[in-house]
Image (cartoon, helix red, strand yellow):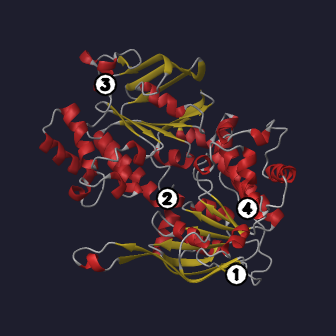
Amino acid sequence: MTQSLLDVKGLRVAFGGKEVVHGVDFQIAQGEKLALVGESGSGKTVTALSLLRLAQNADVTGVASFAGGEGGGARDLLALPESKLRGIRGKEIAMIFQEPMTALNALYPVGDQIAEVLELHQAMSARAAHEAAVQLLADTGIPEPARRARAFPHQLSGGQRQRAMIAMALACRPRLLLADEPTTALDVTVRAQILDLLTDLQHKYGMAVLLITHDLNLVRRFADRVAVMENGYIVEHGLVSTVFDAPRHPYTRKLIDSRPERDVAPVTDRQAEPVLAAKSLRVTYPVSRPGFAGWFRKGEFVAVQGADFRIAPGETLGVVGESGSGKSTLALAALGLLKHQGELDVAGRRWNNGGASDRALRRVMQVVFQDPFSSLSPRMTVEQIVGEGLTVHAPDLDTAARRARSLDVLAQVGLTEAQFPALLDRYPHEFSGGQRQRLAVARALIVDPKLLVLDEPTSALDVTIQKQVLGLLQRLQRERGLSYLLITHDVEVIRAMAHQVIVMKDGAILESGPVGQVLDAPGHPYTQKLVAAAMAD
């Protein structure tokens, strides 16, 4: 190892007297890429935030020696006064946060936010800082950087927002970059672009990178060394090749073995009446037209154009594509939540675009959303959440019958009162992410639907929890004969779950067919790009 840039010894972090990081040690050499890996709650993000004392209300002890102080000596980041540490944040050590939409200020153009860093740390004039901000955006590969510098965060795509965050972090050419899950919220192709960008910029500026992630494929592709965290302890560390090829700790082996596995039953009769069928499905949104023409007539944005598909009983149709491809709009139309043109039949009956006859169809089709924390009301108990559908679709049931049905369906998804005493009286915050997603599945199953729309059901979960939830969905499909409309950008999830797959881009279906045919021998260049990016990732 070359000269150490950051040397952390005995780092302990506690909140309200409860210790969550227990005396961890690690080093980062100049120009090195170290990955800190672990599931949610392992302590990896708190560890990184504590280095810059950004963890609020945390009691932090230990030593974090950062090289390059006055006279070439090291400085203890944990002992520096706030005034000195403020000069290091952003200038010598920068950070990229997981969700750029919340990390960027929604009220200011991205160029102004980047320029502010340069004015603060480099004492640049406003004009020089703006010019430098535009160049930084260009360096990160954003097209039309001068125009994008004037854009607000909501006017950029997810990948462009993350590039703007990277530009801000690299504005002062820091010697250490802390990257906290920098690609988790991105599509597979954009994720590959961001990784390549970080690698190029790391080489260009010679900076070290501390990557915080739960994605082992990301680590394998990007990092030089890896440290594995579990419950606030570093349980294994070493070269990426050594740790991945011969993991010593059981937790590391569990993470490596957590890739999605295919365990689905074949469809017995694809000619049976479909649970869901669409023909020439089209969804449009009105948009403003430029100039005087916009005063008299709205324009039209076509979000889904002429989609045809069918889902047989017990079948999973996977819909894959990048953000903005139209796959979520397709799911909302299938659920009867968007007005549409063309034919859309559920169990042989037509959606009526909001008519009274649609209520019965909503029992046939239920949905499981991406983020179980935001999709479950924090003010409702488990009994209220899971039993809510029965109050609409089975109003004749009394309280005792609803409770019995709720407990039964909760047991089917792996949640019992033996594990969680007073289960029905608990609230969502009392459960882990995977357990909350099981609650969401139970809420959907309680009305005995024939089809579930799964909108990115595992993208917000750790790899080990993802594997558990996918296994649950596969088991429920076999036991109940359920059909799934699976919306995702994760090719590996499609490969594990789907019987048929359609590939969408810009609202159009570019390719469709059996999952093995489409993913193993893709015919369209866009599908080839998606599959190649997933394999590289």
Q: Residue type at mark 1: give it.
A: Arg
Residue under pointer 2: 188
Q: Callout 3: few (<14), some (14-19), or many (20+) C-alpha neighbours within 10 Å?
A: few
> Mark 4 or 2 closer to N-term?
2
Number of the front mark, 4 or 3? 4
Cα distance between the residues tagged 4 and 1: 20 Å
- Asked whether the viewer can see residue 255, the reply is yes
- Circle on res. 501: none
Q: Residue type at mark 2: give it.
A: Val
SS at mark 2? helix
In the rendered image, residue 288, in percent from the top left (x then y), is placed at 32, 72
Quarter of the image where one finds residue 331 = bottom right
Cα distance between the residues tagged 1 and 3: 63 Å
Q: Is residue 77 left or right of residue 443?
A: left
Residue under pointer 1: 349
Q: Is residue 123 left or right of residue 335?
A: left
Cα distance between the residues tagged 4 and 3: 55 Å
